[in-house]
Amino acid sequence: MRLRIRHVIFVSLMSLSIWQLFEAGYIHAKAWIAQQLIQVAWEDTVTSTDAQQPWPWADTQAVARLTAQDGTVDLVVLSGTSGRTLAFGPGHMAGTALPGSFGNVVVSGHRDTHFSFLKHLGAGDQLTLQSTNGNTKVYEVIGTEIVHQNDVAVAMDAGDDRITLITCYPFDAPIPGGPMRYVVVARSISTQYLEI
């Protein structure tokens, strides 16, 4: 009888472990596949000037393309910051400057998928943000900070041309969605007009 109980416990624990590994892999796979579909929608949006949905039932659309770390990070920014949107890519916060316009463009993303690279950014690093009209702005990181989720000052207009990237903090927290946020602020240093 004891051997049978041990066997049941062992099988249960192994099943739970396999399920947890599958869940972790599934989240990363879903994020990667979604970005591939979103990249195609982005290319269609830029060439047609009409916002394209990445899949027929999508409730968001591509609004910008963010690159960093000499192009090794290449993400399409979606409209909105709902949990459903952020599962597929970084999202532009409503009420802040639109990508391509002057002001504070605020973009949020998950710390364990799309915005995990933020922990490696520092002063002087460059980011580029391409808007749907093809214009690309180059930004230079001027600082990082850790703030409470209720600190809305980071999303306010600062009177200059900047991009603010926000993700949960700490990066290695075992439970997501804590009260702290990691913020990267970069100021515009140039605008490039691309012919489409």
Image: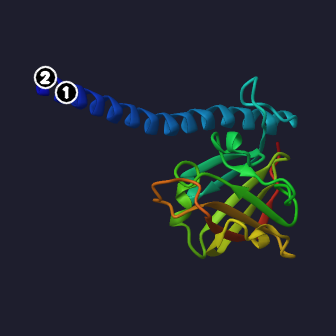
Circles 2, 1 touching at the beta carbon (< 8 Å): yes
Residue drawn where x is 80% and y is 39% of the image? 46
Q: Secondary structure at mark 2?
A: loop
Residue drawn where x is 83% and y is 75% of the image? 158
The image quadrant of residue 5 is: top left
Quarter of the figure with the C terminus: top right
Residue drawn where x is 57% and y is 32% of the image? 33
Q: Nearer the viewer, residue 13 or 52?
A: 13
Residue bearing mark 2: 1
Question: Residue 16: where, in percent of width, then height?
Answer: 35, 33
Q: Nearer the viewer, residue 67 or 63?
A: 63
| Left or right of residue 127: residue 1 | left
Quarter of the figure with the N terminus: top left
Q: Secondary structure at mark 1?
A: helix
Residue 188, relative to residue 85: is it above or below? below
Q: Residues within 10 Å of mark 2 (few under 14, many from 20)?
A: few
Q: Nearer the viewer, residue 117 or 124?
A: 117
| Left or right of residue 191: residue 122 | left
Report the amino acid beneath label 2.
Met
The image quadrant of residue 185 is: bottom right
Q: Residues within 10 Å of mark 1 (few under 14, many from 20)?
A: few
Residue 72, relative to residue 146: is it above or below? above
Residue drawn where x is 74% and y is 49% of the image? 81
Question: Residue 50: where, in percent of width, then height?
Answer: 87, 34
Report the amino acid beneath label 1.
Ile
Residue bearing mark 1: 5
Using the image, tell me which numbered label, if any, was put on residue 13: none
Residue 191, relative to residue 92: is it above or below? below
Question: Residue 145: where, in percent of width, then height?
Answer: 62, 75
| Left or right of residue 187: residue 19 | left
Q: Give the Cα distance between marks 2 and 1.
A: 6 Å
Question: Residue 85: where, in percent of width, then height?
Answer: 70, 41
